[in-house]
Image (spheres, grey):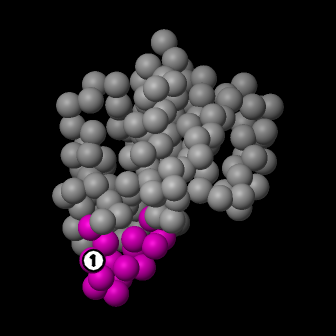
Amino acid sequence: MKRAVFPGSFDPITLGHVDIIHRGLELFDEIIIAIGINAEKKHMWSLEDRKSFIEHAFHGNDRIKIKTYEGLTAEFCKTEKAAFLLRGLRNSLDFSYEKSIAQTNAMLTGVESVFIISSPESSHISSTIVRDIARHGGDFSALVPKGIQK
């Protein structure tokens, strides 16, 4: 079974994430959406809300698993017997950031990273933009799956 981990804080999950996950299902038998727990990071949505949003977005898809983890992502992959990390790239800055991490993960743990380029329709979407719109009372519904509220 080809299993990949798609890690992130998902604060909140966006349509960009959803696009990458759906396209990743063409490559992998199972994708674990892994919500990283970082006690030092301030999140707009609680861990329970973020997990609930993801569950709602992928309800009924038994090829998607949703888990939380602490620590190194590559170690989580090994624990879950996932040989691949799935990552989305919106632009060259994302690639520069992700490349070093991918090379280090492969060297230390043998976990390979697979990059999917964002679709043009979602390449402008980021959780940071959604949080900024939400913080200022704007309507971010066109950027996230249905059911996500402030």
- Counting from the top left corner in percent of width and height, residue 72 is at 61, 42
Q: Left or right: where does residue 44 sit relative to residue 72? A: left
Task: Specify the farthest residue to the top.
Answer: 1
Total labels: the figure holds 1
Q: Left or right: where does residue 100 sit relative to residue 141? A: right
Along the line of sight, the residue nearer the viewer: 144 or 46: 144
Q: Residue at x 44, y 19 (%)?
A: 29
Quarter of the view holding residue 76: top right
Q: Is residue 80 visible?
A: no
- Counting from the top left corner in percent of width and height, residue 19 is at 42, 45
Q: Residue at x 34, y 87 (%)?
A: 136
Task: Specify the farthest residue to the front.
Answer: 120
Q: Residue at x 43, y 33 (%)?
A: 32
Along the line of sight, the residue nearer the viewer: 76 or 28: 28
Residue with the mark numbered 1? 139
Q: Is residue 133 magenta?
A: yes
What segment is highlighted magenta in the picture? 126-141
- Counting from the top left corner in percent of width and height, residue 131 is at 40, 73
Q: Amino acid at mark 1?
A: Asp
Could you say whether the residue bearing mark 1 is in a helix, strand or loop?
Answer: loop
Q: Is residue 147 magenta?
A: no
Above or below, 25 relative to 45: above
Along the line of sight, the residue nearer the viewer: 10 or 108: 10
Quarter of the view holding residue 94: bottom right
